[in-house]
Image: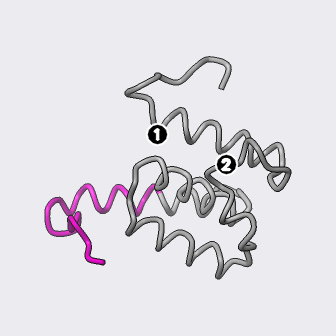
Amino acid sequence: MSTRVSLTKINPNAHAAVLAMQKYVDESGLEPLLPELIKLRASQSNGCAYCLDLHTKDARAMGETEQRLYTVSAWRETPFFTERERAALALTEAVTLASIDHVPDSV
């Protein structure tokens, strides 16, 4: 598996912005696993194999269970996610697919 685009080479300023956003998330007070679940679900929606590999490895390293990793794509049909995680996953889907459905007010 190879990286398709090197953001660092193409646009160093954009790469710096992504790193700054990650720093903000890291310092936001969210439990560390929640952003990984969010990234994993967005990567599933985007069909990015590189990102799926990266975020599942990172989530496992943080102690995520195989059962939850296997069912992130079907989170609505499982009892394995908290209400907070469900809200984050719903928002992730809505924002990731905003060009298709926009982000509904209810989400």
Q: CA distance from mark 2 to mark 1?
A: 16 Å
Instruction: Determine the residue positioned at 65% across, 44% down.
Output: 89
Count of marks overlaid on the render:
2
Magenta span dominant secondary structure? helix
Is 24 in front, or is 100?
100
Quadrant in the picture for residue 24? bottom right
Is 1 in front, or is 23?
1
Q: Circle 1 is placed at which residue position?
A: 96
Quadrant in the picture for residue 48? bottom left
| 93 in relation to 53, above or below | above
Can you name the residue that lies furthest to the bottom here?
61
| 84 in relation to 24, above or below | above
Q: Amino acid at mark 1?
A: Thr
45 is within the stretch colored magenta: no
- For the magenta stretch, what is the residue range? 1-21
Image x and y of residue 54, in percent: 47, 73
Relative to 27, 19 lies left or right: left
Image x and y of residue 12, in percent: 20, 63
How dense is the environment of label 2, judged by Cα within 10 Å: few (below 14), some, or many (20 and up)? few
Q: Which is more N-terminal, label 1 or label 2?
A: 2
Q: Circle 2 is placed at which residue position?
A: 74
9 is within the stretch colored magenta: yes
Which secondary structure, mark 2?
helix
Quadrant in the picture for residue 47? bottom left
